[in-house]
């Protein structure tokens, strides 16, 4: 692993982008099931999402007027939307699976609609509160605790308006106070913490520091619980050692590569993080007895896709689509100036053939495949699909 100084330079560059049960057991519902469609569905009235660039649908753009340039958004929206991909993200496929509209980002002031929820995610966000070093490296000030603080203000204002009789006209644009305890709370965050606090360290210190990150994460879950959240859908982190950007920034020795071609030590750190995350979720289940916490194994879904890429029509599973001809991916994050002329980066002719979009974030095609394999519940603990995530196992 590189020296701390060199690694910090690498992290600073990455920050520009990341600105990131057995079915047969007896079950009961933590809230009433739907009266429409499948009787087993939870009929969530709203979804509230927290996270980093993996689920940011325009938060950075709304906060800092910083929009990823074309060709971002080319596949589905046909224009940049603030998403770091050529198309939809997992949170968009969650909305589709639950038959909801795409969620407005909380800071969006241009005709947002929060009737079915809100997205508080910010690219570059971390679990750990922002400190001076993280700020210097360019990470987002909207860490998870601040996103939850925004949610608290959002909820409090809605309740106040209903209690004071000033809610006229809100019904079609905001959730009702009764929706908050029945809503689904989705969380996808932690990757940036691994980059900024863990990757620059030696292996021993890195693994030890994971506990601090997990402690902060747990405190944030407990805070959401105090604010009325009861149903949680929590993603673990993906295989960092398979991220093409890390091959550019941390060129590995051949002996450091696993059988799939990924950097073994980076994936081991991600797995250590995921193991502690899962253990903490199990502990939280015993402490928050009326809450339902689903651990979503994003890592296994993505690693499986990389390992079997050709069988699913993907080429070069460790390559990426959006880059300049010299292989530089940074143009997908901000425009490049050549001889005084601002230019957009080129991208491959068919993004659906690639897993990675810009060396850090995935293409819509890969995200769709991964979403299909986590939203159906097959990789989750407990093994329930997202539409039935209000279920709770009796052990």
Image (tube, helix red, strand yellow):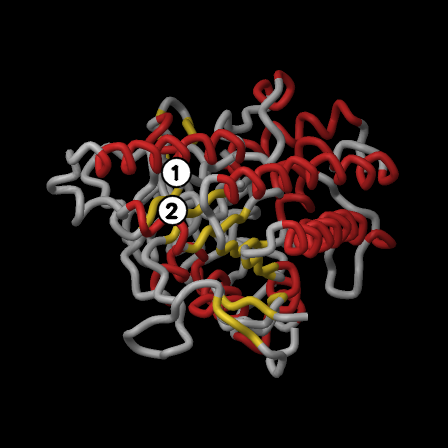
Q: Name the side, left or right, on which 264 lies relative to 51.
A: right
Q: Residue 319 in the image: x percent, y percent?
A: 59, 56
Residue at 63% from the left image edge and 70% from the top image edge: 394
Residue indicated by mark 2: 72
Residue at 60% from the left image edge and 67% from the top image edge: 380
Camera sees residue 170? yes
Residue indicated by mark 1: 68
Quadrant occupied by the C terminus: bottom right
Q: Residue furthest bottom?
A: 24
Image quadrant in which you'd find residue 302: bottom right
Residue at 53% from the left image edge and 41% from the top image edge: 20
Q: Is residue 290 above or below residue 177?
A: below
Q: Residue 215 in the image: x percent, y percent?
A: 69, 38
Q: Please say if the residues under marks 2 and 1 sit with CB atoms less than 8 Å apart.
A: yes
Q: Nearer the viewer, residue 342 or 383?
A: 383
Q: Residue 178 in the image: x percent, y percent?
A: 32, 50
Q: Residue 110 in the image: x percent, y percent?
A: 21, 35
- Count the marks: how many? 2
> How far is the residue under mark 2 from the one under mark 1?
6 Å
Q: Nearer the viewer, residue 147 or 206?
A: 147
């Amino acid at each position: 692993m590189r020296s701390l100084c060199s690694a910090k330079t690498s992290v600073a560059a990455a920050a520009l982008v990341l600105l990131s049960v057995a079915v047969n057991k007896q079950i009961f519902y933590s809230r009433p099931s739907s009266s429409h469609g499948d009787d087993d569905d939870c009929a969530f009235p709203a979804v509230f999402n927290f996270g980093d660039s993996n689920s940011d649908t325009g938060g950075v753009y709304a906060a800092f007027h910083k929009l990823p340039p074309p060709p971002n958004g080319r596949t589905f929206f046909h224009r940049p939307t603030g998403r770091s991909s050529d198309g939809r993200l997992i949170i968009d496929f969650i909305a589709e699976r639950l038959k909801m509209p795409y969620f407005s980002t909380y800071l969006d002031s241009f005709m947002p609609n929060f009737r079915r929820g809100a997205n508080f995610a910010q690219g570059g966000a971390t679990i750990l509160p922002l400190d001076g070093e993280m700020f210097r490296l360019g990470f987002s000030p909207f860490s998870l605790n601040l996103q939850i603080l925004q949610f608290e203000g959002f909820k409090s204002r809605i309740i106040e308006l209903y209690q004071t009789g000033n809610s006229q006209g809100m019904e079609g644009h905001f959730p009702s106070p009764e929706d908050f305890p029945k809503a689904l709370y989705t969380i996808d965050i932690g990757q940036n913490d691994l980059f900024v606090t863990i990757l620059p360290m030696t292996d021993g210190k890195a693994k030890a520091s994971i506990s601090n990150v997990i402690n902060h994460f747990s405190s944030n879950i407990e805070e959401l619980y105090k604010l009325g959240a009861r149903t949680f859908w929590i993603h673990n982190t993906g295989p960092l050692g398979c991220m093409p950007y890390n091959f550019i920034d941390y060129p590995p020795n051949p002996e450091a590569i696993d059988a799939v071609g990924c950097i073994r030590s980076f994936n081991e750190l991600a797995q250590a993080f995921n193991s502690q995350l899962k253990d903490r979720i199990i502990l939280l289940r015993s402490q928050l007895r009326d809450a339902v916490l689903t651990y979503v194994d994003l890592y296994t879904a993505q690693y499986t896709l990389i390992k079997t890429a050709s069988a699913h029509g993907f080429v070069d599973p460790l390559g990426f689509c959006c880059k300049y001809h010299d292989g530089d991916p940074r143009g997908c994050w901000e425009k490049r100036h050549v001889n005084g002329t601002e230019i957009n980066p080129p991208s491959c002719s068919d993004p659906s053939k690639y897993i990675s979009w810009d060396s850090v974030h995935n293409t819509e095609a890969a995200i769709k495949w991964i979403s299909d394999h986590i939203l159906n519940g097959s990789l989750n603990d407990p093994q329930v699909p997202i539409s039935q995530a209000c279920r709770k196992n009796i052990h």
